[in-house]
Image (cartoon, rainbow, N blue to C red):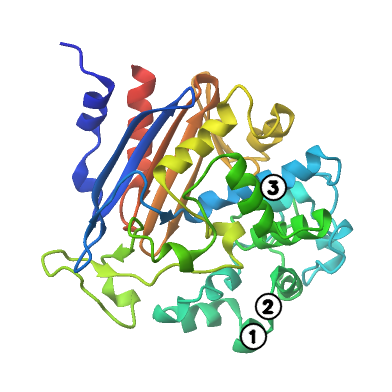
Amino acid sequence: MRLTLEEQLNHVIRPQDFLVGGAVVVVKDSQVMYGKGFGKARIGENERDFTPDTIISIQSISKSFTAASLLHLVEKGMLELDAPVVQYLPYFQTTEKRISNTITVRQLLSHTAGFAGDIGIGYLLCTNAKKFREFDEVKKQYGVTDSDLEKIKNREDITKFFKSVPLSHAPGTDWSYCTDAYMIAADLYEKVSGQRWDKYIEDVLFKKLDLKRTTLHAENIYKDENSALYYCSNQEILHHVTKPNLDMDVFECPYPINSLGAPMGFIYSTANDLGKYLSSYMSEAPFISQAMMNPMYEPVWHFDRETGYGLGWGTREEGNLLIIEHGGGFHGISAYVCMVPSERLGVVVVSNHDETPSQEICYTVLDTLLQK
């Protein structure tokens, strides 16, 4: 007897891979083909099951929303991808001003701007970062002082902080993932558009895509009964250790809150809403035009013959199929999404434990679907 799609996926998705909880959603032709929660969104006194509608931090999957916001400005003729960032933000520079003056918008969004990697400022701005033992070590590692942090009140201040950041290579000559650069991208959106990035994302993009349980406001969703708490297995990273369930070898992580850092990784969503989001790229009337999707999906940097990075999305070629994907991770969080535009097929995996193999689960589900 031939197995149904649900039976096939239930066979390949192992519940034990979700070390606390999570959800998997599959969309095809803008319809949910499969949606299932695994384990717990919260453990301990207020234990709750994890469902496809459980709100959770999606971390770096947020970057695609930021890239889309800038591409909307490109579509309106207000922004050019190959124009220097400094053309729009005259105060943007690094320690090598002459060189950083050549960094383009495309390079900023594709992690080819020349930064050595993360500069730490985004992490250190997290409201609860001091609850991690590594906080002072990260400040020391990246040369960020308390005075630096106190001066940052908005995203323009973050852009200006880059004046103290050296480049490790010439723009466009190498790839190095700098999550902090996406806060500059949001500052760029605000200066060019004349409106707050947050307002556009919530009042326009989320509403247009009907993402009713997607938000930037951690303080609101923390009170939502169907929202996740976050867990890890390494208690050594925590100042204050809380073990909410004595039968489980996991510890509660601080809640991920960073309002200034939303463009780089602090959007909160659900597996179902992320399924809608993926579908919005692949529908007959996509929320962003095909002319704008092309540069998003075109690798600016090739890691090898099959994989690369475009604008806010990773790219992978498998046979004659182009797969668009991105992950998100932080203490207590593991998430991954991928889509095959030509098949109008997307997979979402989210989890509230940082060791859940979300990418592996996502690939396993996608491979199963493509073999069907």
Residue 178 seen: no
| 9 in relation to 118, above or below | above
Q: Position of residue 79 (x, y in %)?
A: 83, 46
Tell me which label, 2 or 3, sits earlier in the chain. Answer: 3
Q: CA distance from mark 2 to mark 3?
A: 22 Å
Residue depicted at x 84% and y 53%: 84
Query: Farthest residue in the left direction?
Result: 247
Q: Position of residue 24 (x, y in %)?
A: 34, 39
Q: As drawn, is 297 to the left or to the right of 9?
A: right
Q: Secondary structure at mark 3?
A: helix
Local packing at callout 1 (Cα closer than 10 Å; few below 14, some 14-19, many 20+) is few
* Residue beneath the point at 34% across and 70% down: 253
- Callout 1 amino acid: Glu
Helix, strand or loop status at disc 1? helix
Q: Are marks 2 and 3 in contact (CB under 8 Å)?
A: no
Identify the amino acid type marked 3.
Ser
Q: Quadrant of residue 19?
A: bottom left
Residue 10 placement, left or right of 263: left
The residue to which callout 1 is attached is 150
* Left or right side of 102 for 148: left
Circle 2 is placed at which residue position? 153
Q: Amino acid at mark 2?
A: Lys
Rounded to the nearest angstrom, the CA distance separating label 3 from label 1 is 28 Å
Q: Please tell me whether mark 2 sits on a helix, a strand or a loop.
A: loop
Q: Considering depth in this image, is 309 or 150 the residue closer to the camera?
A: 150
Tell me the residue that label 3 is attached to: 69
- Is 35 in front, or is 105? 35
Q: Above or below — where is 84 with respect to 279?
A: below
